[in-house]
């Protein structure tokens, strides 16, 4: 019974190590991705609308710490 438990623990540890390797590989950006120019986020139509018609804010802006 203890042997089966130890085998399960070893298998879980092996699985965990494999998952961590996969995660670390995914975190590092692939080299060909760095060459591409940065794609601006957001909807270009919405950005253009904000540029032509900037939002106005009523009242006083009080930053709260």
Image: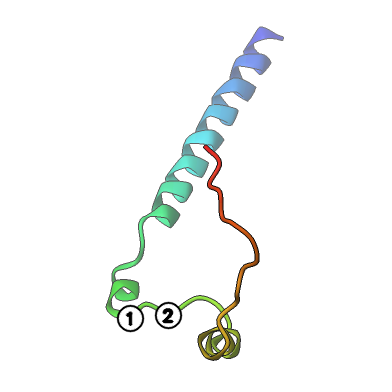
**CB contact under 8 Å: marks 1 and 2:** yes
In depth, the one of 20 and 2 nearer the eye is 20
**Residue 58 in the figure: left or right of residue 40:** right
Residue 31 position within the rendered picture, expressed as x and y whole percent measured from the top left: 29, 69
Single out the residue that lies furthest toward the front. 59
The residue at 34%/66% (across/down) is: 30
In depth, the one of 17 and 33 nearer the eye is 33
Dot 2: few (<14), some (14–19), or many (≥20) neighbours within 10 Å? few
Dot 1: few (<14), some (14–19), or many (≥20) neighbours within 10 Å? few
The image quadrant where one finds the N terminus is: top right
With respect to residue 9, does 43 lie above or below? Answer: below
Q: Quadrant of residue 59?
A: bottom right
**Residue 54 in the figure: left or right of residue 28:** right
Q: Which residue is mark 2?
A: 39
The residue at 43%/44% (across/down) is: 21
| Structure colour scheme | rainbow
Residue 44 position within the rendered picture, expressed as x and y whole percent measured from the top left: 54, 88
Single out the residue that lies furthest toward the top. 2
In depth, the one of 2 and 31 nearer the eye is 31
Q: Which residue is mark 1?
A: 36
SS at circle 1 = loop
**Residue 4 in the figure: left or right of residue 33:** right
With respect to residue 46, does 7 lie above or below? Answer: above
The residue at 55%/81% (across/down) is: 54
Mark whose residue sits in front, 1 or 2: 2
The residue at 56%/41% (across/down) is: 64
With respect to residue 65, does 45 lie above or below? Answer: below
Single out the residue that lies furthest toward the right. 1
* Spatial CA span between label 1 and label 2: 8 Å
**Residue 54 in the figure: left or right of residue 39:** right
SS at circle 2 = loop
């Amino acid at each position: 019974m203890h042997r089966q438990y130890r085998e399960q623990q070893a298998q879980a540890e092996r699985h965990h190590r494999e998952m961590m390797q996969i995660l670390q590989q995914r975190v590092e950006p692939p080299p060909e991705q760095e060459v591409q120019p940065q794609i601006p986020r957001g909807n270009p139509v919405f950005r253009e609308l904000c540029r032509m018609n900037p939002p106005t804010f009523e009242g006083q802006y009080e930053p709260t710490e």
